[in-house]
Every structure is written in C-alpha cells, then in structure tokens.
Image (cartoon, rainbow, N blue to C red):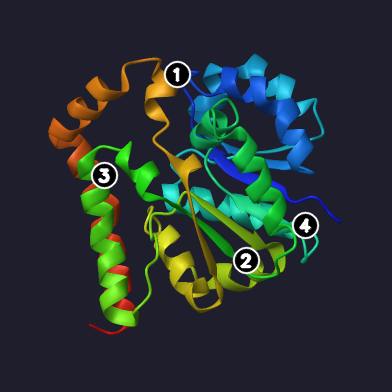
Amino acid sequence: MMLPAVVFPLHDPDGLIFPHLTRVTSTLKELFSRAFISLTPLTIEKHIEVVSYLEKDHFFNLSPIASGTLVGDHFRYLYQTAVSTSDPTQLLHLCFSDRLSFILQSKHRVQFFADIQAVNRMNVPVLFCRSKAAWDTHPLNYYEIEQFATRAGELLFGKTLDFAWCHLAIQAGYLKDILPNIRNHDMSMLGEIMLAVRDNILIRDVDWLEWEDPFLLSCDATALKVEREKSFLETQKRLSYIVPTLQTIAGKYNL
C-alpha cells in the first residue's frame, strides 16, 4: 500500500517550529512517503542553514512562496504543488506544522499513528475534528468564534463540520478537481474546501488536536489560556477568518 504524503505551510521567522520539525522527521518518515512544505520569504531569510539542510533530504519537497502572497493563495499554491507531483490515488494529509510537531512529541503519538494508518484504507476524504476533550484545552474565545461557522453549516445543510479545520486527509485527484473552484484569498479558503467535500466526507473526532501553543511556547497552559481569552487581539484574529467564512457559507446559498 502506498504511504500517504503530508502537506503543510510553514511561516516560522522566529524559529519556533524548525527545532521540533527536525526532532520528528524520523517519525514523519515512518508514516508518510513525502512532506510537501511551503516556506514564506521571511522564514527562508531568517533560517537559510536550516532550509538548506532540509533541501538535502529528498523526503522534503520545499516550495518558496513569493513575497506578498496572501495566506489563501499561499495554501492554494502549496496544495497545487502537492497534487501536481502526486499520483491521483495518493492520500494527502493537509495539516499544520505546529500541531503536527506537538502531536508527535505528546501522549497522543500512538493514537495519531493508529488513526493515520486507519484512513489509508479509505477512498473518501476524512476530516479529523477536535473532540470535546481537545476543544476543552483551547481558549473559550477560539471555540465560541469558530462555532459560528459550524452552527451556520448545521442550520443551512444539517451537517456538523469544522470550517476552520486542522487536519484533512484527501486523495490528490479529488483535491486537484476542486482546487480550480477555490477562490478566496484568505484563510476562509479552508471553508471553501470544506463546502466542496461536505457531501463525501467522513468525520473523526480526535483528542490529538488539543491546543498546541503551551507545548511550543514552553509555558503554563492555564495561564496562557486565561491570557488568550482576555485578549482583544486574539478575539479579533479569530473573527478575521470566521467572518469571511460565514460570508462564503451564506454565498453558497445566495443569502
């Protein structure tokens, strides 16, 4: 059976993720055949030696992103790169470097392995969603704001989905077919992808999508959670992608 590939964007000018990525590389190679990674210009500029090190490892397919590229276009370019160089039946795990780095160094590692290997046998997209236990670790404002979109989807088409998803397993051929119809230039393009696959998707709630920031920042989880819940900027950040996501969902039904 063909191993899946993992696909994630990387904006890491502060060098927070790179050390973790190097630590989990051997584990990634046990689960995946390749890693498709897009790199922002500032990330490359600040960490030339690390990027050069990764370039020498054929497991990594690195794609530099042009300066000034909007985040949605960044993701689209990465996904297009992955589908253009993969067999149509190749399973791609679209995810995020920070969560992946945390999961593979946490108590969730064994369950993550089992879940990734289980979906290898499925030929429909699988959306891994945050379980109640996982959501309980996140700041409340994160949950409440992202639920706006989930609730809108439930009201409009009777299905509970995560429109700001963290981990989607999808065949390269399927993703290639839907990418031309993804138009948004911001993070709401993730919601567009979810709308495109919503009728042909399996959903798995998992604990391993718990909040990764306390681990990556090496700080007290409770204190950080309280700080983020009180932060106007954090609330504004969540609204910045959920509002256009709501507009995208409503636009689907010409509301």
Distance (Cα) linking label 4 and label 3: 34 Å
Compare marks 1 and 3 and give the one earlier in the sequence: 1
Distance (Cα) linking label 1 and label 4: 31 Å
In percent of width and height, residue 189 lies at 42, 60
Which three-letter amino acid code belongs to the residue tagged 1?
A: Asp
56 lies left or right of 76: right
Residue position for label 4: 86
Figure disc tally:
4
Q: Residues within 10 Å of mark 4 (few under 14, many from 20)?
A: some
Q: Is residue 41 above or below residue 124?
A: above
* CB atoms of marks 3 and 2 within 8 Å: no
Which three-letter amino acid code belongs to the residue tagged 2?
A: Leu
Distance (Cα) linking label 1 and label 3: 23 Å
Q: Which mark is residue 105?
A: none
Quadrant of the rendered structure where residue 176 is? bottom right
Residue position for label 3: 142
Which three-letter amino acid code belongs to the residue tagged 3?
A: Tyr
Compare marks 1 and 2 and give the one earlier in the sequence: 1
Distance (Cα) linking label 4 and label 2: 11 Å
Which residue is found at the position 40% from the left and 63% from the top? 191
Residue position for label 1: 14
Compare marks 3 and 2 and give the one earlier in the sequence: 3
Element type at mark 4 = loop
Compare marks 4 and 3 and give the one earlier in the sequence: 4
Q: Which quadrant is the N terminus positioned in?
A: bottom right
Residue position for label 2: 175
Foreground label between 3 and 2? 3
Q: Is residue 57 above or below residue 134?
A: above
In percent of width and height, residue 28 lies at 71, 34
